[in-house]
Image (tube, helix red, strand yellow):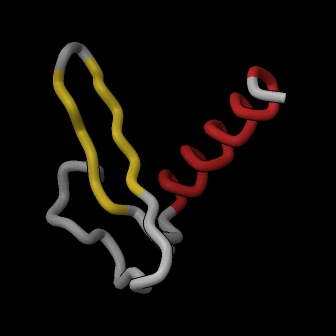
Amino acid sequence: MLDSPDPLCDPPTDIFEQMEVVLDGTQHDATTTTCSQAPLQAARKAAEELRLKYVP
């Protein structure tokens, strides 16, 4: 999904979100602002859980 053409959704102009994953040395990234696809929502949740665990 992150290798799809940018932007993945129709983003607003006043906020910005981008996701990047490096897997086996290959970078995958995309602008994901306001995207509601299930994989992106799961990635946001996982990132928030890591933030809460490691960044007080």
Q: Residue furthest top?
A: 24
Exactly how many numbered labels are in the figure?
Answer: 0
Measuring from the top left, give residue 54's x and y in whole percent. Answer: 75, 21
* Residue at the (45%, 60%) spot, across then down: 17
Residue toward you, 46 or 52 = 52
Q: Is residue 55 left or right of residue 4?
A: right
* Residue at the (18%, 59%) spot, across then down: 4
Q: Could you say which quadrant of the image residue 30 lies in?
A: bottom left
Measuring from the top left, give residue 47's x and y in whole percent. Answer: 62, 38
Q: Quadrant of the C terminus?
A: top right
* Residue at the (80%, 33%) spot, across then down: 52
Q: Could you say which quadrant of the image residue 55 lies in?
A: top right
Q: Could you say which quadrant of the image residue 16 lies in?
A: bottom left
Q: Is residue 33 left or right of residue 1?
A: right
Q: Is residue 27 above or below residue 1?
A: above
Measuring from the top left, give residue 32's x and y in whole percent. Answer: 40, 63
Q: Is residue 12 above or below residue 49?
A: below
Measuring from the top left, give residue 20's x and y in whole percent. Answer: 34, 40
